[in-house]
Amino acid sequence: MPTPKYKRILVKLSGEALMGKQGYGISPEMIDYISGEIRSVYDLGVQIALVIGGGNIFRGAAATSYGMARAVADHIGMLATVINSIALQDALEKRGIQTRVQSAIEMRAIAEPYILRRAIRHLEKGRVVIFAAGTGNPYFTTDTAAALRAQEIRAEVLVKATKVDGIYDTDPLVNPKAKQIPSVTYLEVLRRQLKVMDSTAISVAMDNLLPIIVFNITVKGNLRRAVCGEKIGSCVKELSNSA
């Protein structure tokens, strides 16, 4: 069995990753596949936390474009992340993994409130923890929530699971000549406005020297490879950081 490089990780999943080939919602096949990928890392003894976006159900940016107040749109988006979190919890528990959903917006009937010490205790007991509802505040993305939660739980790495192979100089879905960037510093991401995570998330990671690995989750085994330290995707870090 391979040896993991990291003992505690936070995985950031986009809501769109749960759609699979659908144009909306949650694909049963995709959520089962993702739960299997998480199980493969869980079996290595790695402590796993997750943050999931809500773009497969509701996109606040689109709603604000036709006149909805930003705070209202963001709160609806937070609720979408709770839906995704509960769905992934169900898929993980069907694979025998004890899972807890902690929501930044209190809704005790379906999720625990976010309490840092309790979250760390869950991780120490071998439970997967899913952080839902972003930071609980409008104007902050789930990228920022992922960077914040990763730092709070003292995760060793933030793993961003996407539909592309890593970080590119331009959008590879638009420009077929886009070039992949294997490694880049936080400041370079901000300076070049590379589409990795929003600037607030990158700033949080930079201030705390939290490495970010970006890779394609749809390639089977990639999550396990990233956790075991194989060179896949792209990495955001300081040059002196060997992660």
Image (tube, grey):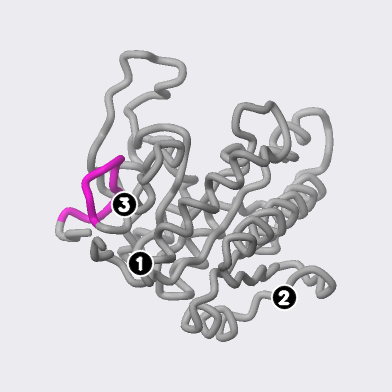
Question: How far from the left and from the top, in percent, is residue 10?
Answer: 45, 62
Q: Residues within 10 Å of mark 2 (few under 14, many from 20)?
A: some
Q: Earlier in the sequence, mark 3 or mark 2?
A: 2
Distance from the alpha carbon under mark 3 to that under mark 2? 29 Å
Question: How far from the left and from the top, in percent, is residue 66?
Answer: 81, 28
Q: Residues within 10 Å of mark 1 (few under 14, many from 20)?
A: some
Q: Nearer the viewer, residue 16 or 126?
A: 126
The answer to whether mark 2 and mark 1 are in CB contact below 8 A is: no
At x 33%, y 30%, the residue is 168
Amino acid type of the residue that numbered disc 3 sits on in the rendered structure: Ala
Distance from the alpha carbon under mark 2 to that under mark 1? 26 Å
Is residue 226 rendered to the left or right of residue 112?
left
Amino acid type of the residue that numbered disc 2 sits on in the rendered structure: Glu
User: Which residue bears the numbered disc 2?
Assistant: 112
The answer to whether mark 3 and mark 1 are in CB contact below 8 A is: no
Label drawn at residue 226: 3
At x 38%, y 72%, the residue is 45
Task: Give the magenta part as a residue range.
Answer: 229-239
On whether residue 51 falls in the magenta region, the answer is no
Q: Is residue 133 above or below residue 31?
A: below
Q: Nearer the viewer, residue 32 or 56?
A: 32
**Is label 3 in a helix, a strand or a loop?**
helix
Q: Is residue 82 above or below residue 175?
A: below
Q: Quadrant of residue 211?
A: bottom left
User: Which residue bears the numbered disc 1?
Assistant: 44
Q: Earlier in the sequence, mark 2 or mark 1?
A: 1
Is residue 123 rendered to the left or right of residue 205?
right
Question: How far from the left and from the top, in percent, is residue 93?
Answer: 63, 64
Amino acid type of the residue that numbered disc 1 sits on in the rendered structure: Leu
**Is label 2 in a helix, a strand or a loop?**
strand
At x 68%, y 59%, the residue is 90
